[in-house]
Amino acid sequence: MSPAGKSGFTLIELLVTLALAGLLLALVPPLLGKGTDAARLKHDSRILAAQLRQARSQAIASGKMVTVIPHASEGVTVSGDVEIRFFPDGSASGGAVELANKSGVARLSVDGLTGAVGR
C-alpha cells in the first residue's frame, strides 16, 4: 500500500501494461489478414461457380450460346481456361479454372458433356 493510504498504479505497472498492449496490437493484424484472404478466395470461388451455373441455365433458356470469362476480386489471381462456353443443349466447352491467393487455391471444373460445375 502506498503512503497516506492512497491506492493506484505504479509507473512500472503502467509501462508493463502498455508494452503488452503494444505487443498485442503488433501481432493481431497479420493474423486477421490470413483469415480475410481465405474468406475472399472462398467468396470468389462461390461467386464464379454461381455465374457458371447461371450461364448454363441462361443458354438453355435462351437457346443461344453463353460465354463466361472468369474474373476475381483484387488479390485473387485467375488461371486456367480463359473462357468457358455453354450451349443450348446444356453442354459446355468444358475446362477448369483456378483461383489463387496467399491463403491457397480453389479449383472449379466444368464438365463438357453435361455442363455441370464442380468444385
Image (cartoon, rainbow, N blue to C red):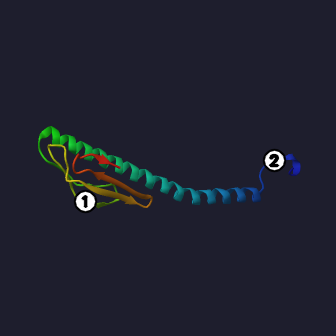
Between 46 and 26, the residue placed more toward the observer is: 46
Q: Secondary structure at mark 1?
A: loop
Q: Is residue 75 visible?
A: no
For residue 92, side relative to residue 97 (left or right): left
Rendered residue at 61%/57% (across/down): 24
Residue 7's mark? 2
Between 101 and 117, the residue placed more toward the observer is: 117
Decide which of tag 2 and tag 1 comes sooner along the chain: 2
Rendered residue at 83%/47% (across/down): 6
Q: Quadrant of residue 72?
A: bottom left
Nearer mark to the viewer, of 2 and 1: 1
Residue 8's mark? none
Whether tag 2 and tag 1 are in contact, CB under 8 A, the answer is no
Q: Secondary structure at mark 2?
A: loop
Outermost residue toward the left in this view = 63
Please name the residue that numbered disc 1 is placed on. Answer: 81
Where does the image place residue 44, in percent across and percent down from the top left? Answer: 35, 51
Amino acid identity at mark 2 = Ser
**Callout 1 environment at 10 Å: few (<14), some (14 to 19), or many (20+)?**
some
For residue 106, side relative to residue 10 (left or right): left
Where does the image place residue 56, in percent across and percent down from the top left? Answer: 21, 44
